[in-house]
Amino acid sequence: MIKENLEKIRTVIPQGVTLVAVSKTKPISDVQEAYDAGQRIFGENHALEMRDKHEALPKDIQWHFIGHLQTNKIKYIIPFVTLIHSIDTANLLEAVNKEAKKHDRVVDCLLQFHIAQEETKFGLDMEEARQLLDSEAFKQMQNIRICGVMGMATFTDDEDEIRKEFKHLKSIFDTLKQEYFSGQSQFKEVSMGMSDDYPIAIEEGATLIRVGSKIFGPRNYN
């Protein structure tokens, strides 16, 4: 079933959009099945779970960290993580930079913005992002690379609201590109859209979509 689900999604994703298969809470056998069907990019939101899966699975997998990252857990993923989607504070970015330096790595990161109505979602606002990007501390960080932005829309059936929030994230991306990253080719990612709303996200300019249940079935929280 996983293979069929992946094929179905791939047929509707345009060129230039990358599928992150969200494998959190799923067993290693499910990830292997998706891998065997050609999927190479997987998203996890728990550092220890991601580390264990990395150890057990093929080494050409690109692991994306997509959840709220606690500073005391960074060390478990820095040796191998491909992209961290969820940088939501200056402190977190500094901690990632510090840990990446120990491993002589430059780690790609996205700035997470709060675009939803719900207060529970994490993320920066534009003012905080500017403070971060203007800071001396940021200019000294040699072991991280900002590659774009990430956001989560409100959990709602209101498609107009979702579209508005995705438009907002894309406009944040465009503003930052112009003000801070013009001419920097690595700043190109807009990570938005999940199983229920990725078609809208693609229409509004997503370059990365994070799809879980539409590939692996409902999440298992046991």
Image: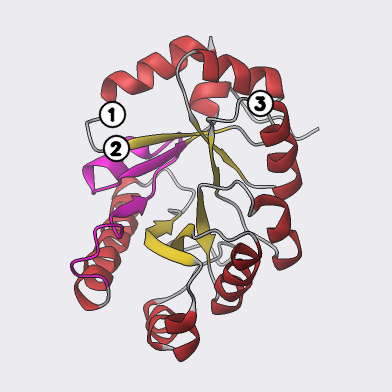
Cα distance in 3D space between marks 1 and 2? 6 Å
Q: Position of residue 164 (x, y in %)?
A: 28, 57
Stretch of the chain drawn in magenta: 181-210
Q: Seen from this angle, which residue lies furthest front?
A: 104
Residue count near mark 2 (Cα–Cα under 10 Å), binned few <14, some 14–19, many ≥20: some
Residue at horizontal 68 percent and vertical 28 percent from the top? 26
Q: Residues within 10 Å of mark 1 (few under 14, many from 20)?
A: some
- C-alpha distance separating marks 3 and 2: 24 Å
Q: Which mark is residue 55?
A: none
Q: Are marks 1 and 2 in contact (CB under 8 Å)?
A: yes
Q: Position of residue 175 (x, y in %)?
A: 23, 72
Mark in the foreground, 1 or 3: 3
Query: Label 2 belongs to which residue?
Result: 17
Residue at 66% x, 26% y is 57
Q: Residue visible at 53% across and 69% down?
A: 88
Residue corresponding to mark 1: 13
Residue 90 appears in which quarter of the rendering?
bottom right
Q: SS class of the residue under badge 3?
A: loop
Q: Quadrant of residue 180?
A: bottom left
Q: Label 3: how many residues lie within 10 Å, few (<14), some (14-19) or many (20+)?
A: some
